[in-house]
Image: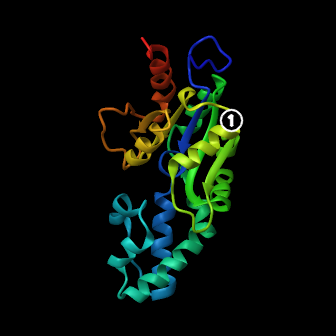
């Protein structure tokens, strides 16, 4: 039944998509874009209208709109990468309600992991700068040049937590990643507060962080019935 040390059935572990549903990078993304263009191209731009559509995509997608040439866009992308790893770190936010939601899950003695598309060193800095290191027991991020394979990152977390996929859940805002991890036998949940959550009838949606514990516990209490 997936008892995590308590009397009520619930998952032994929950793995989160760090980039999509824990950390809110929109303010940091906008800062990087606007400051890079100002410092390298000598002009001020307002990237606010691009944030929702482009903040989870490669820098070049938004810079292709703002830059005066493809060469300038490439140079700006390099600068944005550097800024995102350094000066923009203080602009990162945690989605509203996440801290209390993670605290509630830990109160149920559920282990928490996270996966990230970012290089491991950058992801660690993000967790530490936002205070999420208080909750996350294991982080599995990519190595330089390594392709993003969410199921593989998820497996690393479960191995560290000594938990089987059927006793675990995965929460993300990316339906393709949710489908990939569900193929491992884990229970996927879509983060309704994530911009790219989308809709899939087979994936239950957690409407907001305060609903997280209730939604997950309700599923575990009724599964197999």
Q: Is residue 46 visible?
A: no
Identify which residue, 140 or 40, lies in the foreground: 140
Badge 1: residue crowd in 10 Å (few <14, some 14–19, many ≥20)? some
State which quadrant residue 55 falls in. bottom left
Residue 45 coordinates in the image, percent (x, y):
39, 77
Q: Disc count in the image?
A: 1
Residue 204 coordinates in the image, percent (x, y):
38, 30
Residue 166 coordinates in the image, percent (x, y):
53, 27
Q: Can residue 149 be seen in this view?
A: yes
Give the secondary structure at mark 1: helix
* 29 up-or-down from 181: above or below: below
Residue at x 32%, y 77% (from the top left corner) = 65
Location of the N terminus (image quadrant): top right
Horizontal side, residue 109 vs residue 94: left or right: right
Q: Name the residue under label 1.
A: 161
Identify which residue, 73 or 181, lies in the foreground: 181
Residue 201 coordinates in the image, percent (x, y):
29, 33
State which quadrant residue 134 falls in. top right
Location of the C terminus (image quadrant): top left
Horizontal side, residue 131 vs residue 92: left or right: right
State which quadrant residue 146 falls in. bottom right
Residue at x 56%, y 48% (from the top left corner) = 152
Q: Which colour scheme is used?
A: rainbow
Identify which residue, 76 or 17, lies in the foreground: 17
* 86 up-or-down from 65: above or below: above
Horizontal side, residue 152 vs residue 5: left or right: left
Residue at x 63%, y 45% (from the top left corner) = 156
* 114 up-or-down from 74: above or below: above
């Amino acid at each position: 039944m997936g008892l995590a040390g308590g009397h009520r059935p619930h998952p032994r572990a929950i793995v989160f998509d760090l980039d999509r549903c824990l950390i809110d990078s929109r303010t940091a993304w906008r800062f990087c874009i606007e400051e890079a263009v100002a410092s390298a191209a000598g002009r001020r731009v307002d990237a606010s209208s691009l944030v929702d559509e482009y903040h989870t995509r490669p820098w070049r997608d938004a810079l292709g709109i703002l830059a005066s040439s493809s060469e300038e866009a490439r140079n700006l992308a390099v600068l944005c990468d550097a800024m995102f790893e350094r000066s923009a770190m203080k602009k990162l936010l945690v989605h509203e309600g996440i801290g209390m939601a993670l605290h509630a899950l830990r109160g149920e003695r559920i282990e928490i992991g996270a996966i990230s598309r970012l290089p491991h060193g950058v992801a660690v800095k993000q967790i530490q700068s936002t205070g999420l290191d208080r909750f996350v027991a294991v982080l599995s991020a990519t190595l330089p040049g390594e392709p993003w394979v969410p199921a593989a990152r998820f497996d690393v977390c479960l191995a560290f937590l000594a938990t089987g996929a059927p006793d675990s859940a995965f929460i993300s805002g990316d339906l393709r990643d949710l489908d990939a991890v569900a193929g491992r036998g884990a229970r996927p949940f879509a983060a309704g507060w994530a911009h790219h959550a989308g809709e899939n009838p087979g994936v239950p949606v957690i409407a907001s962080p305060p609903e997280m514990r209730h939604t997950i516990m309700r599923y575990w209490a009724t599964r197999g019935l």
